[in-house]
Amino acid sequence: MSKGSGIDVKNFKPAIVYTIYIAATPEQVWKALTTAEFSRNYFSGFAIEADLRVGGAFVARAPDGSEHISGEVIECDPNKRLTVTWNVNWPALVEKLGPTLVSYEIEEAGDVVRLTMLQSHDRDISDDILSGGRAGWPAILSSLKSLLETGHALAIKMQPPERMLAALKKMGIGVPM
């Protein structure tokens, strides 16, 4: 396993932790998390593009092709662990809230995979702002689970929670919608 040197992961504390069990192999889960081919299906049309090496680019493109999330690979241990910076490209968001780290831990658990997602920050983030991730991650990862287990993703209508949008607006962070 290699680690990036640009960000000290020790300064980041998990704010959201979500664990799900999936009837799949670690290789299948890894591919689903790291390729546009899979992510478009379970992530509301968003395409993950990842240069799977430390320092490589990590991008989530919106269905219109724009870069919704940009970042870089911080840790990469194929089929076991991936940590990336997960910076939503909304005006002033990263400047005011700092970078976000998202880590995926993939572990065999008998005949299934235990997938744990951690969203971490290097500063305290309000519950209002975290409400978006707390609503979004279970929906995204449940859809990934369904896709891998049944071949069909879930059609979950997702929108940022009003309390998150209000908190961002109060901080002067623009949210294009």
Image: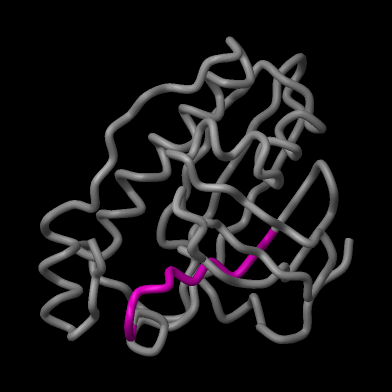
The residue closer to the viewer here, 166 or 112, is 166
Residue displayed at 53% across by 54% down: 118
Query: For this rendering, which residue is in front, 139 or 14?
Result: 139
The spot of residue 100 in percent (x, y) is: 49, 71
Residue at the (49%, 78%) spot, across then down:
99
Q: Which residues are magenta?
A: 83-92
Quarter holding the N terminus is bottom right
Residue 159, placed above or below residue 53: above
Q: Is residue 19 above or below residue 82?
A: above
Taking the view exactly as shown, the residue that stands out farthest to the right is 1
Residue 129, image x and y in percent? 25, 65
**Residue ranking furthest to the top:** 150
Residue shown at the point (42%, 54%) measured from the top left:
16
Specify whether 147 is left or right of 132. Answer: right
How has the structure been colored for display? one colour
Above/below status of 22 relative to 136: above
Residue 133 image point, x, y percent: 36, 53
- Quadrant including the C terminus: bottom left
Examine the structure image and report whether residue 154 is included in the region drawn in magenta: no
- Tell me which residue sits at (48%, 39%) in the image: 43
In the rendered image, which quarter is residue 110 located in?
A: top right
Q: How many marks?
A: 0
For residue 90, above or below residue 25: below
Q: Quadrant of residue 96?
A: bottom left
Horizontal relation, residue 131 to residue 10: left or right: left
